[in-house]
Amino acid sequence: MTYCCTCRDPLEAVPRILDALRRLGLALKALQIESCQERGYAVRFALSLAEPDRVNLFANRFDLLSAAWREVEHE
């Protein structure tokens, strides 16, 4: 599952994402941060394979975390 969000400061967003993953025992497969000029930064990341229940719980938490940011996509 791949996620993307935009944020003003990736140094704020990425640690929150990593903390949520760590607490749920999930791991990243990929992480990418790109500058979006006036929109700030795009943070894209993919999760390693895991139990569907844990992934769904993370998706719910990510939605809460990204409420302060603008969520771009859920694939």
Image: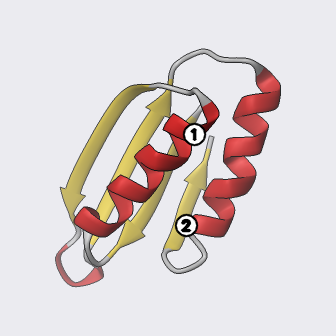
* Callout 1 secondary element: helix
Where is 28 relative to 2, above or below?
A: above
Where is 23 relative to 8, above or below?
A: above
Q: Residue at x 52, y 46 (%)?
A: 3
Q: Residue at x 54, y 47 (%)?
A: 20
Q: Residue furthest right?
A: 53
Where is 17 relative to 35, above or below?
A: above
Q: Quadrant of the N terminus?
A: top right
Nearer-the-camera pick, 23 or 42: 23
* Callout 2 secondary element: strand
Q: Residue furthest bottom?
A: 38
Please tell me the numbered disc located at residue 14: none
Q: Earlier in the sequence, mark 2 or mark 1?
A: 1
Labels in figure, total: 2
On the image, the x and y values in percent for residue 33 come to 24, 51
On the image, the x and y values in percent for residue 72 come to 53, 63
On the image, the x and y values in percent for residue 17 come to 46, 51
For marks 2 and 1, give the CA distance. 21 Å
Describe residue 19's horizontal placement relative to residue 1 as left or right.
left
Describe residue 30's horizontal placement relative to residue 10 as left or right.
right
The residue tagged 1 is: 23
Q: Quadrant of residue 13?
A: bottom left
Q: Amino acid at mark 2?
A: Glu
Where is 14 relative to 50, above or below?
A: below
Category of crowding for the residue at label 1, using alpha-carbon neighbours closer than 10 angstroms: few (below 14), some (14–19), many (at least 20): few
Category of crowding for the residue at label 2, using alpha-carbon neighbours closer than 10 angstroms: few (below 14), some (14–19), many (at least 20): some
Q: Quadrant of residue 36?
A: bottom left
Q: Residue at x 23, y 64 (%)?
A: 11
Q: Nearer the viewer, mark 2 or mark 1?
A: 1
Q: Quadrant of the C terminus?
A: top right
Q: Amino acid at mark 1?
A: Arg
The residue tagged 2 is: 71
